[in-house]
């Protein structure tokens, strides 16, 4: 118990870093994943090809390798990035690949008739996506997107290998200086679980809100 | 005919030599059809005859392979004769002047009945929110659903959904309304409420193209019935004439199947009704 009290400030700070990595990467991943999903379903072959290649690469290789490529590999090309931005960059690229597939699943779940009803009114494509397709697609894609957010929150632990002192690395360093690994990692695990429980609750509330029209 | 000026200028729709194939299947094999202003045209035909494809070509939801589609003076030449941008402009103009009512309603499930009706005025016609609301409520009242304005589609019956869909179509203030089998997805006892709204619309002088098997509606509301089979128009005429004395054997066979109130055609010598061999792709 000493450990928890004594190292509480350090753990709290590390938890903040974990949250920062997870939330920022998720938001940026969504921002990148959405255009990727639209490219993937577009009528232009080139755009589709780019999106398919992107997903193939970033979903098909380990996140750990992507993180190390950014932090240890890029300096060889003269690009030096600080540890936290490196981790955010890699996590974002990785999350975008998965999130784009979640978005795409949501969009193709929207009935063809919905597109046709809006098209038959002469609704421009952008407005059609925003006002008709997006609200219905998000509802379908929300559960997998929530799962992806939670997975991403746990994936931030890999940032520890590029010297980012987030929860996992903080627990490791507390453990190694006190030899109380059991407590250190248990508390870190509990912290991840707390964060993710909050995310699940938020997801549930959002699902209920978006589902109101369908009750 | 409630409109005398049948000259070319009065035509709301003019279809010329329209061809459409889905893969190996040729669904439209050269269809010509004009619809005058204020005219109500019912299109009938067996499943797979191409009637749904034809009406979907009128607002270019389906892209014809060849031929021309002229709606309200805007022409689309099909088969790559037009520049992409010019074509898109014409398609948009045609869609702004037409509205479609679908077999499966296609109401927007995330919007209330009022939201559905007001969506087009708001996001296509750029109408202010309050004006769109007033227009929407007025139209819902017109189809007898003023009390359902705040209900979501999931809470409406099929007949109510289709009436909302008609109100949504009218909200675009179209010059032509296209009905693609508007009662086919409804239980029989719900047909009447939808047909009543359509009949009223016809009385008000709206130009309408209606793909349907509703013989009674055709008899009462249509100015002309067009019979299609195998991707071509086989027969076209005033409803009393066509429904009572169809000329083409296939029209006779078809009417025997859909209408019990049609006089029996002369006995013997006709081919049996063509079975529905394929449902064409949507």
Image (spheres, rainbow, N blue to C red):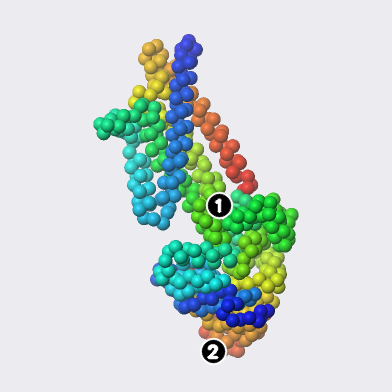
Q: Is residue B279 visible?
A: no
Q: Measuring 71% from the left and 55% from the top, which residue is drawn there?
A: B134
Horizontal and vertical percent for residue B66?
43, 73
Mark in the foreground, 1 or 2: 1
Horizontal and vertical percent for residue B144?
73, 61
Instruction: Tell me how far mark 1 sits from mark 2, CA to CA.
Output: 54 Å
Q: B203 or A207, which is in the foreground?
A: B203
Q: Are marks 1 and 2 in contact (CB under 8 Å)?
A: no
State which quadrant residue B102 falls in: bottom right
What label sits on residue A132 in the rendered view? Answer: 1
In the depicted structure, whether residue A93 falls above or below residue B81: above
Q: Secondary structure at mark 2?
A: loop
Horizontal and vertical percent for residue A45?
36, 55
Residue corresponding to mark 2: B269
Q: Measuring 34% from the left and 47% from the top, which residue is drawn there?
A: A53
Q: Secondary structure at mark 1?
A: helix
In the depicted structure, whether residue B92 falls above or below residue A91: below
């Amino acid at each position: 118990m000493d450990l928890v009290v004594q190292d509480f400030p350090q753990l709290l700070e590390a938890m903040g870093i974990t949250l920062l990595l997870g939330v920022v990467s998720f938001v940026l991943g969504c921002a990148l994943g959405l255009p990727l999903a639209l490219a993937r379903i577009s009528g232009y072959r080139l755009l589709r090809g780019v999106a398919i290649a992107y997903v193939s690469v970033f979903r098909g290789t380990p996140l750990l390798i992507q993180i190390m490529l950014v932090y240890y590999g890029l300096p060889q090309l003269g690009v030096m990035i600080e540890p936290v931005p490196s981790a955010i960059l890699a996590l974002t690229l990785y999350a975008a690949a998965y999130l784009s597939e979640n978005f795409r699943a949501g969009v193709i779940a929207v009935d063809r008739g919905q597109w046709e009803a809006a098209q038959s009114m002469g609704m421009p494509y952008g407005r059609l996506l925003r006002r008709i397709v997006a609200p219905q697609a998000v509802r379908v894609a929300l559960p997998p997107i929530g799962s992806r957010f939670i997975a991403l929150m746990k994936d931030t632990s890999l940032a520890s290998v590029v010297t980012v002192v987030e929860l996992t690395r903080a627990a490791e360093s507390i453990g190694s200086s006190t030899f109380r690994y059991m407590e250190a990692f248990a508390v870190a695990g509990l912290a991840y679980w707390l964060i993710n429980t909050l995310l699940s609750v938020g997801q549930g509330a959002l699902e209920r809100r978006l589902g109101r029209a369908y009750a | 005919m409630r409109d005398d000026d049948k000259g070319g200028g009065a035509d709301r729709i003019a279809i010329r030599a329209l061809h459409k194939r889905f893969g190996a299947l040729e669904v439209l094999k050269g269809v010509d059809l004009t619809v005058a202003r204020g005219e109500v045209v019912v299109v009938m035909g067996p499943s797979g005859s191409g009637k749904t494809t034809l009406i979907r070509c009128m607002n270019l939801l389906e892209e014809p392979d060849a031929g021309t589609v002229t709606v309200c003076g805007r022409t689309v030449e099909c088969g790559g004769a037009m520049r992409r941008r010019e074509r898109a402009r014409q398609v948009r103009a045609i869609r702004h002047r037409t509205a479609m009512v679908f077999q499966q309603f296609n109401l927007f499930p995330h919007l209330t009945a009022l939201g559905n009706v007001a969506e087009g005025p708001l996001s296509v016609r750029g109408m202010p929110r309050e004006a769109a609301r007033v227009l929407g409520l007025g139209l819902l009242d017109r189809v007898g659903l003023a009390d359902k304005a705040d209900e979501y589609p999931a809470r409406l019956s099929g007949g109510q959904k289709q009436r909302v869909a008609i109100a949504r179509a009218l909200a675009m203030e179209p010059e032509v309304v296209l009905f693609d089998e508007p009662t086919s997805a409804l239980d029989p006892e719900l047909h009447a409420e939808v047909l009543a709204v359509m009949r009223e619309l016809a009385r008000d002088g709206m130009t309408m193209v209606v793909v349907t098997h509703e013989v009674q509606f055709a008899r009462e509301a249509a100015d002309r019935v067009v019979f299609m089979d195998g991707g071509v128009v086989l027969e076209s005429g005033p409803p009393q004439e066509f429904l009572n004395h169809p000329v083409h054997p296939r029209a006779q066979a078809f009417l025997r199947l859909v209408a019990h109130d049609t006089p029996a055609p002369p006995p013997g010598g006709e081919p049996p009704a063509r079975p529905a061999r394929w449902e064409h792709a949507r």
